[in-house]
Image: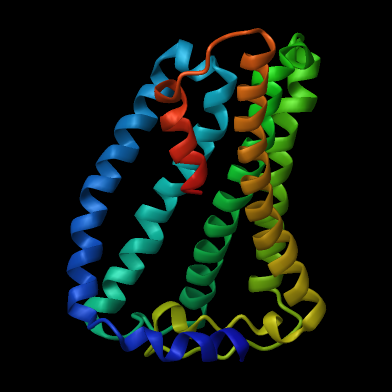
Amino acid sequence: MIQNKLLQEPDFLIPYPIRFWVYLFSLIPSLACSIFVLYHLLIDKVLHNALNNHVIIVLLLNNLVYQLIDIPLSLSFYHLGNVWPASPILCLFWMFIDETLFSLSLILVGGASIQRHILIFHKQWLSTNKKRIFIHYLPIGVLCFYCIVFHFITILFPPCQNRFNYNMSVCGYPLCYYDIRPMLVWDIAINKMLPTLTIVVFSIALLVRVLLQRRRIHQHIQWRKHKKMTIQLLAI
């Protein structure tokens, strides 16, 4: 299979024991930070009600699930050297979690890149509860629903037969639907390339719009004030 072949060689570049300890030492502070930030965003009503924090909350929940499920499965594999228990059900579950959460993070950040323009330049679009439901809440829900349903169908009920390799991480990642060209093109183009392109284009556009608006209202543009945002956008 296409993806399986791509993963076979790089899988052994870094010894499993080293990967295990790197993952473990990274997981502990990462998990603590996720819980800490998520706790304050959910407890503090001001932060919780701020529209710009809603996507961040969903992303944190998404990452928390990844840290609690996907990373421990990887730790088990790197510790034992194989998938345990060697079960097709575990492999399907692992692939579903891994692929869904990765795609969901990418798609949500892409959606957030668009919503930032609305929150900054078109606040009147969110002036009523009805507008907020259709323009803010509904898109987030639709993106999450689409991502979960797409991977639920393609991974758990694919129109082909997956072949698992219990001696490789994520059971060799045997996504057999990658051998079906229309599904492969859709997954790469819509779930991977489109969100990435959206993030880049709309982030750069946001920076340009902010700078142009400041010039338009005759305010002096100070590089220090925009340096942090510029670095963040260029780092995407």
Residue shown at 57% from the left, 9% from the top: 219
Q: Is residue 172 left or right of residue 197?
A: left
Residue 232 % position (x, y): 46, 39
Residue 109, by quadrant, is top right
Give above or below for 151 relative to 80: above
Give above or below for 220 relative to 8: above
Residue shown at 55% from the left, 50% from the top: 105
Residue 117, by quadrant, is top right
Q: Is residue 229 left or right of residue 185?
A: left
Residue shown at 55% from the left, 65% from the top: 99
Q: How many marks?
A: 0
Residue 58 % position (x, y): 53, 37
Residue 66 % position (x, y): 42, 55
In the picture, the quarter occupied by the N terminus is: bottom right
Q: How is the image coloured?
A: rainbow
Give the camera-side residue of 70 and 185. 185
Give the camera-side residue of 2 and 145. 2
Q: Is residue 52 left or right of residue 140?
A: left
Give above or below for 101 relative to 217: below
Give above or below for 155 relative to 58: below
